[in-house]
Image (cartoon, grey):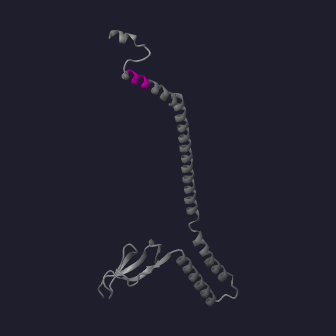
Amino acid sequence: MDNAQDSASPEQPTNGVAQGATDEVNAGVDNVDTLPSLEDQLRQLELKATEHHDAWLRAKAETENVRRRAADDVSKAAKFAIERFANELLTVKDSLEQTLAAENVSLETICDGVELTLRNLGKAFEKSGLLDINPVGEKFDPHKHQAISQIPSDQPANTVVQVFQKGYSLESRVLRPALVAVSSGTAG
């Protein structure tokens, strides 16, 4: 029996386990040939890194462009915010100039010119969202009115009975409160 084992050639394995191990080693060698080398992998990763860096630089540049454009838009909006209102005031100025340039001026002509100018100014205010605050008979509102006196009246207490100076609001925001006198609620 010992001769049988000795007679086996060293190239041929004596059992199936050794043959399977040899096949796995050979398969591993084939797989190594198909896997990219470390240098190839490094080169591919460097290319991807370069692509990502380029994309990042482009995104950063685009962000800066958007920021700059937005700043320009804000600057232009601030510069030209009153453009519409200014155009409306040109009509008012024209009316004043026509009144002053009129020959044979009478008091009636001047009054007509001033009334026309006031109507044009009212239209300009209205188109721009600038509204009068004229609160006679309304309940006193400290957000819209500034009371400078309190007078006896038949009106209920804290009712506006007299307006000394109109107030103005722009798009629901008070620019100037109305100067008013309010009722003390007791008639004298």
Q: Position of residue 175 (x, y in %)?
A: 46, 71
Q: Report the magenta stretch's main SS.
A: helix
Q: Considering depth in this image, is 10 or 7 the residue closer to the camera?
A: 7
Up the image or down, 73 lies above or below 134; here it is: above
Membership of 21 in magenta stretch: yes
Q: Position of residue 104 (x, y in %)?
A: 69, 88
Up the image or down, 81 lies above or below 117; here it is: above
Q: Considering depth in this image, is 39 or 91 the residue closer to the camera?
A: 39
Q: Residue at x 48, y 29 (%)?
A: 31
The range drawn in magenta is 18-24
Q: Residue at x 40, y 23 (%)?
A: 21
Q: Position of residue 102 (x, y in %)?
A: 69, 84
Picture quadrant of residue 113? bottom right
Q: Considering depth in this image, is 49 or 164 the residue closer to the camera?
A: 49
Q: Considering depth in this image, is 26 or 53 the residue closer to the camera?
A: 26
How many circles with numbers are drawn on the protein? 0
Asked if residue 36 can be seen in this view, the reply is no
Q: Residue at x 43, y 17 (%)?
A: 12
Asked if residue 8 can be seen in this view, the reply is yes
Up the image or down, 50 lies above or below 2; here it is: below
Up the image or down, 25 lies above or below 167; here it is: above
Picture quadrant of residue 93? bottom right
Q: Is residue 26 left or right of residue 112?
A: left
Picture quadrant of residue 82? bottom right
Q: Is residue 13 left or right of residue 115?
A: left
Q: Is residue 166 left or right of residue 67?
A: left
Q: Identify the residue at the far right of this view.
A: 103
**Quadrant location, the N terminus:** top left
**Quadrant location, the C terminus:** bottom left
